[in-house]
Amino acid sequence: MSATPQKNRATRRVLAAAAGLATVGALVAAMPAGAHDRGRGHGHKPRTVDVQLLSFNDLHGNLEPPAGSAGNVSETQPDGTVKAIPAGGVEYLATSLRTARKGNPYSVTAAGGDMVGASPLLSGLFHDEPTIEALNGLDLDVTAVGNHEFDEGAAELARLQNGGCHPVEGCYEKGKKFKGADFPYLAANVTKEKTGRPLLKPYTVWKKNGVKIGFIGVTLEGTPDIVTANGVKGLKFHDEVETINKYARELDRKGVKSIVALIHEGGAPASTSYNYDCDSPGAGDGISGPIVDIAKGITPKVDALVTGHTHQAYVCTVPDPSGKPRMVTSASSFGKLYTDTTLTYDRRTKDIVRTSVKSANHVVTRDQAKATDMTRLIDRWNKLAAPIASKPQGWISADINGRGSTAPEKPLGNVIADAQLEGLAPADKGGAEVAFMNPGGIRADLVHKASGSEGDGVVTYGEAFTVQPFTNMMNVVDLTGAQLVTALQQQVSGGNEASPKILQVSKGLTYTLDLTKSGADRVVAGTIKLNGEAIDPARTYRVAMNEFLAGGGDGFAALGEGTNKLVGASDLDLFNAYLAAHSTAAAPLAPPATDRITVIQ
């Protein structure tokens, strides 16, 4: 399906508004040393103009403030202690962005991908139409696609861009047709296999009063490894650096010298505090991960990189191929932070004065006024979702952390894996002996405090959906003991060596993870036991997992080798069934012990 995005309505809005915003004489701009035209003469424009770039990433349809620890950002205090600040929610994000724009006649808002997908029920139930509507209201000018934009395939992504009601579920509100995104989705490194042509626009140019800034958007090349096969059917994903360099040359030839790359790939700062200085002791020294090599390979024609995917907060300068520092930013996730970057634009060279680029992350605090238009939007969709969202599924005695847990073995991961094992252990349901859950599929915590009127400790369908929003179908397959051992080693080797992906395992499976070793050796093979017995390499085991893992997703090629597949219920259905079977108001489910994986640090 062709996916040509609409003309950028947001940019047209900005241009129209700009005409009456400010006379050029009102602009105060820092002049580069030695500039002959200082703009003092009557009718002269100043040589430079400061453009405000506001950016965020990985919103994942979190319109309401994310609950529990997933809704906090860490801030290091002057005395060295770390404080957790509740943040996020589009009512506050809208206020933050609107406040930040005041006094900045040249302001452009961009995003680094994963605006939708893996969303809470309020957005996910309606195929993320509410989030696109909210982003239109936030005056987003442009975003890159992220891997989650492909969760429901290219045709659905085209619908989010161009509008139209859902092909199966139709229109959600009587007499209202979904309009689509006012902003372009950019996917420079995604082409259609049949034609070799880009799926969506590779770049867009933001213009105002003669100031031109080009935006190139890419997602991570490894998207097919982390999205279900159906989501990326018929698409090819190309190298991020080669693609950006190609389109930077094209923009340069067209006279666009100021370029920002929006990249859905990221890094890991040495501290999780948003105000950590990752240029300490030297430029970019405090950050690692894929974005570092990408940044070092991208042509110096690109002036700044807005990144995402890793849900981390950082503002770093990483040297470009010529050795000059260049700004690389990421604003955590779920709308908890936004980045404010000053790009000083030189009207004579039409380029950004790179030495004057300044940037900082800011917390989207919840003690500011809510944007009333966003409150109305949330209330409207909540009314539609209420009959499904508010149904109780079970009870918990305390928070059961999933997304908010930084430990390799997460309490909520254990609950989910146990739910999958229990649901698929009966012979007629697959005869599962062990279950594996990918950590990235756990999207939230189960929070004890009530989210609405249901009462503390009640788990509603909406809350369960927020934890497991993909509704992946479950598979039970045959794997040999040798394949099981290999799969566990793939958590910490190959593509997962630099950033381990520790599978959540069902009760009965135990082993030691020795993080002082390297690669596959970190999983101590001799310690892997199922129900107290060593894994037999030659024996066949029945293993339960979601269809994403069963397809070899997240770098688990060994799990993709399963045979004799039986397809079971969805992961969400099994999760809800487990909550119903193991909890009552009088006897709520307690957070389980995390004693399956013994970690040596």
Image (cartoon, rainbow, N blue to C red):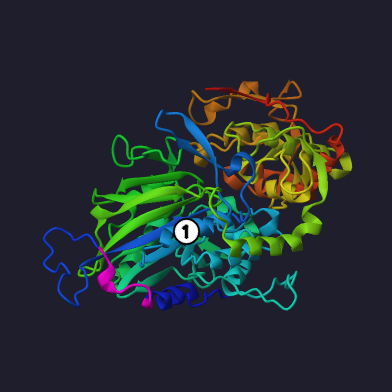
Q: Is residue 175 left or right of residue 218?
A: right
Q: Position of residue 11 (x, y in %)?
A: 44, 73
Q: Which residue is mark 1?
A: 97
Range drawn in magenta: 19-28
- Residue 14 lies left or right of residue 249; in this view the side is right
Report the quarter where the N terminus lies. bottom right
Measured as percent of width and height from the top left, residue 592 is found at: 73, 29
The front one of 317 and 462 is 462
Q: In the rendered image of this protein, does residue 66 appear above or below residue 412?
A: below
Q: Is residue 336 above or below residue 530?
A: below
Residue 543 locus on image (x, y percent) = 74, 38
Picture quadrant where residue 252 is located:
bottom left
Q: Main secondary structure of the magenta part?
A: loop
Q: Residue at x 59, y 72 (%)?
A: 180
Q: Is residue 262 visible in the rendered structure shown here? A: no
Res. 385 visible in picture: yes
Secondary structure at numbered mark 1:
helix
Q: Label 1 is placed on what type of residue? A: Leu
The number of callouts visible is 1
Q: Would you say residue 431 sits in the magenta stretch?
A: no
Please tell me which residue is depicted at 74% across the width and 70% down the height of the picture: 168
Depicted 431 relative to depicted 336: above or below:
above
Expressed as whole percent of the image width and height from the top left, the position of residue 91 reads 58, 57
Confirm whether the magenta stretch covers residue 23: yes
Q: Is residue 377 left or right of residue 95?
A: right
Residue at screen point 49% across, 24% down: 517
Position of 563 relative to 509 (above/below): below
Residue occupying the point 82% across, 37% down: 422
Viewer-proximal residue among 78 and 7: 78
